[in-house]
Structure formats: structure tokens, C-alpha cells
Image (spheres, grey):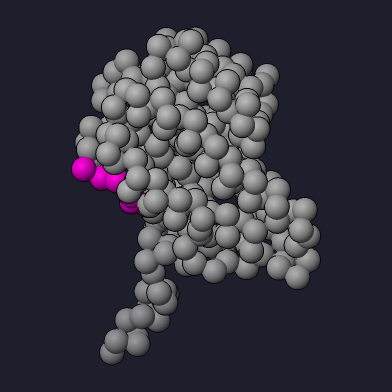
């Protein structure tokens, strides 16, 4: 197991992508702290991992609150004696046209997605620097790399997370801390099951070479890779887990494409 006896915090891990990441890290041998604003949900997720024979504890946290964030990091040391991995997964989405986005909505999105990642990373990095090693991985988004309709607040916050990743990687390398990000495309989650209509799904899938949404476990696998010793010379990188969406241009129906070549 690649992460045997390492200690990890995964924020926003009571459900969805975060829950899958926590489960994957635990399955790789890590001791995982499930951190979520939904304290009861975090406890349930941790209990399920323990039921599966894995090591997990839970802590409630609001990633926008510096005091609670520091308490979260301390909880990792109280439970596991160290902190090797931080995964900044906690986030909020906003699907709103630019002209209708309110200041309050924009600020809230940035506060959770960007400032939350900043606060958690800074609190964790201080302790990791004392150890002389650590890994920080943030869940960004392809919306932070290309324009997407109704994504002004969300896209701006995720673009900033990608840039923050680069700066942290540069400054924290001297302490033995690697900093990377993953940028998912559309993912099958409880949220997208509700918010993504059939028309939205068809539009996404028509632009994704692999013609489908990602599964949460596929995002978790990318995070586990970046946290492992298989990625010891990777830092400052954003790994797209998007089925080729960002890299693709025009996608024709195969029959139409063949006709165009002829």
C-alpha cells in the first residue's frame, strides 16, 4: 500500500468526490481525518471506513474560519501524531449568469473555494515544514482553465486555486512539501444527478472525447497518485481528469469526419 501509516486530512469529505478520495487514501493505508462542515455526515463517513477495517476519524470544520481550520490540523496530530497529506476538496458551486451574479454570491464562492484552500494549506504547511515533508493537493476544476457559461464566480475561484498551487509549490519546496492540484471535468455525484439536466449532459458528452462523465473514484485515483511516492518529482502541476475535454477541439460524428477527410 502506497500510503501506509501516513496521516491525511480531506476537507469536504462527508460525501461525493471528497468521500471517494478519503476512501481511496484509507484503502492505500493512510489514516484519514474526514473534515466537513456537515459534522454528522463526517462522523457517518468515518464510521463506515472503520467498519470496512480502515483508519478514520471525523472533525467538523468550516474552512473559511481560521480558528476551526487550525483546530482541524491539530486534530490530525491528536489522532495520528503527524500530518503527511492535505486534500483541499471542500468547495461550493455556483451556476449563475455573470450579469445576475450578486456580490454576496461571488464573495461566498471565492471565500469557500479559494480562501478556504489558502487557510487550510497554510495551517497544514506550517506543521509539515516542521516535519520536513508533506503533500498538499487541491481539487480545482477545468472551469478554472477555460471559459464556461454561468461560471464567473466558480471559474475565477478555481483559476485562482490553480495559481495558488503554483506559488505554494515554489515557496514550500524548500521544506520538502509538494503541492499539486487535480482539475476534474464533469463528475457523477449526487449533486450533478440533480442539477445536470439531460440537455446539459448531452452537451458535455458531445465535447468530451471519452463521451462520459467521470466517476468519483477516478478523481480519487488521481489524488492518490499525487500523494504517493510515484509522484515524488511532481510539484506545481495541475492534473486534468476530464476525459480529454480541455485538450479537445472540434469533435465530429465519426461518419461526418470520414466524409470531411475524403
Q: Main secondary structure of the magenta part?
A: loop
Side (left or right) of 143 relative to 105? left
Is 117 or 225 nearer to us in this picture? 117
Coordinates of residue 6 in the picture (x, y in percent): 34, 20
Q: Residue at x 67, y 26 (%)?
A: 38
Can residue 164 be seen in this snapshot? yes
Q: Residue at x 26, y 45 (%)?
A: 234
> Relative to 163, is 78 above or below?
above
Coordinates of residue 49 in the picture (x, y in percent): 49, 16
Whether 222 is among the magenta residues is no
Can residue 54 be seen in this snapshot? no
Is 76 or 260 nearer to us in this picture? 76
Q: Residue at x 57, y 66 (%)?
A: 148
Coordinates of residue 153 in the picture (x, y in percent): 65, 59
In the rendered image, which quarter contains the N terminus? top left
Instruction: Say which quarter of the image contains residue 222.
Output: top left
> Relative to 91, is 254 above or below?
below
- Tally the numbered discs: 0
In the rendered image, which quarter contains the C terminus? bottom left
Q: Which residues are magenta?
A: 233-238
Coordinates of residue 158 in the picture (x, y in percent): 53, 54
Side (left or right) of 90 relative to 81? right
Side (left or right) of 132 relative to 111? left
Q: Residue at x 65, y 32 (%)?
A: 65
Is 88 or 182 nearer to us in this picture? 88
> Relative to 9, is 104 above or below?
below
Amino acid at each position: 500500500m502506497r500510503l501506509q501509516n501516513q496521516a491525511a486530512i480531506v476537507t469536504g469529505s462527508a460525501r461525493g468526490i471528497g468521500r471517494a478520495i478519503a476512501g481511496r487514501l484509507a484503502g492505500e493505508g493512510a489514516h484519514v481525518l474526514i473534515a466537513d462542515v456537515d459534522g454528522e455526515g463526517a462522523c457517518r463517513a468515518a464510521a463506515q471506513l472503520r467498519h470496512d477495517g480502515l483508519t478514520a476519524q471525523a472533525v467538523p470544520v468550516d474552512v473559511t474560519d481560521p480558528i476551526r481550520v487550525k483546530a482541524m490540523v491539530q486534530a490530525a496530530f491528536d489522532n495520528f501524531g503527524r500530518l503527511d497529506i492535505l486534500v483541499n476538496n471542500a468547495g461550493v458551486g455556483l451556476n449563475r449568469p455573470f450579469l445576475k451574479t450578486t456580490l454576496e454570491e461571488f464573495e461566498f464562492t471565492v471565500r469557500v473555494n479559494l480562501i478556504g484552500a489558502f487557510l487550510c494549506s497554510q495551517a497544514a504547511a506550517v506543521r509539515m515544514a516542521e516535519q520536513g515533508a508533506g503533500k498538499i493537493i487541491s481539487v480545482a476544476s477545468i472551469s478554472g482553465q477555460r471559459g464556461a457559461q454561468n461560471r464567473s464566480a466558480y471559474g475565477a475561484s478555481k483559476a485562482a486555486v490553480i495559481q495558488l498551487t503554483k506559488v505554494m509549490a515554489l515557496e514550500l519546496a524548500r521544506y520538502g512539501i509538494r503541492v499539486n492540484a487535480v482539475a476534474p471535468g464533469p463528475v457523477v455525484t449526487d449533486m450533478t444527478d440533480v442539477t445536470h439536466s439531460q440537455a446539459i449532459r448531452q452537451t458535455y458528452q458531445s465535447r468530451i472525447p471519452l463521451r462520459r462523465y467521470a466517476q468519483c473514484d477516478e478523481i480519487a485515483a488521481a489524488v492518490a497518485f499525487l500523494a504517493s511516492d510515484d509522484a515524488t518529482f511532481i510539484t506545481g502541476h495541475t492534473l486534468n481528469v476530464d476525459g480529454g475535454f480541455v485538450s479537445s477541439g472540434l469533435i465530429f460524428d465519426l461518419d461526418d469526419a470520414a466524409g470531411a477527410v475524403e
